[in-house]
């Protein structure tokens, strides 16, 4: 009856959260089912949960996920479509711009890959010229 909390994790760390509260006509808290969105500050338990699972998700190659939490318990990890960016931005407007954090992270990952590629090319050239 108090809904759930969607927490967006980027590279294992929270970049935004919201509480989804069910509407009067449906028990589900999904916005598409009539639920509403509210600001939510992570509790101590939720922070500990993020700290515990964040490194594991990153280690598994899951850099951007949405986790759903009810009563401090993890109930779902959304890896294919971690929705909530627009709702989190809306309730925290103008402070949080989740999409900027995501794009900045992706750009840094691409830059890292390009630099690693350049190092391999230079090493190959050095070995070939030796």
Image (cartoon, grey):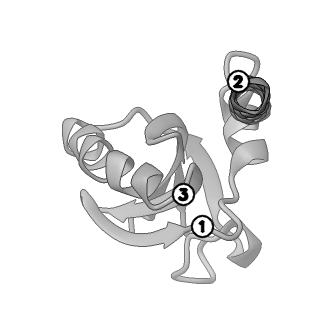
Residue located beneath label 1 in the image: 79
Residue 62 circle label: 3
Where does residue 87 sit, x and y in percent of width and height?
A: 73, 46
SS category of the residue bearing label 2? loop
- Front-most of residues 49 and 1: 49
Gap between marks 2 and 3 measured at Cα: 40 Å
Q: Quadrant of residue 85?
A: top right
Q: Quadrant of residue 73?
A: bottom left
Residue located beneath label 2 in the image: 130
| Residue at 57%, 49% in the rendered image | 63
Q: Is residue 13 left or right of residue 24?
A: left
| Residue at 53%, 57% in the rendered image | 61
Where does residue 95 sit, x and y in percent of width and height?
A: 68, 16
Report the residue that reaches farthest toward the bottom. 26
Badge 2 or badge 1: first in the primary sequence: 1
Where does residue 97 sit, x and y in percent of width and height?
A: 74, 26
* Crowding near the residue tagged with mark 2, few <14, some 14–19, many ≥20 C-alpha atoms within 10 Å: few
* Foreground tag (2 vs 1): 2
Badge 2 or badge 3: first in the primary sequence: 3
User: Do residues under tags 3 and 1 come within 8 Å of each other at their CB atoms?
Assistant: yes
SS category of the residue bearing label 3? loop
């Amino acid at each position: 009856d108090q809904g759930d909390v969607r927490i967006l994790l980027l590279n294992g760390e929270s970049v935004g959260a919201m509480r989804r509260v069910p509407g009067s006509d449906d028990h589900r808290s999904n916005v598409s089912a009539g639920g509403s969105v509210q600001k939510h500050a992570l509790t101590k338990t939720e922070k500990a949960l993020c700290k515990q699972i964040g490194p594991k998700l990153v280690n598994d190659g899951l850099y951007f996920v949405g986790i759903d939490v009810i009563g401090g318990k993890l109930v779902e990890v959304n890896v294919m479509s971690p929705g909530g960016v627009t709702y989190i931005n809306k309730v925290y407007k103008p402070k949080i711009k989740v999409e900027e954090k995501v794009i900045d992270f992706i750009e840094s990952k691409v830059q890292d890959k390009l630099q690693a590629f350049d190092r391999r090319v230079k090493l190959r050239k050095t070995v070939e010229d030796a």
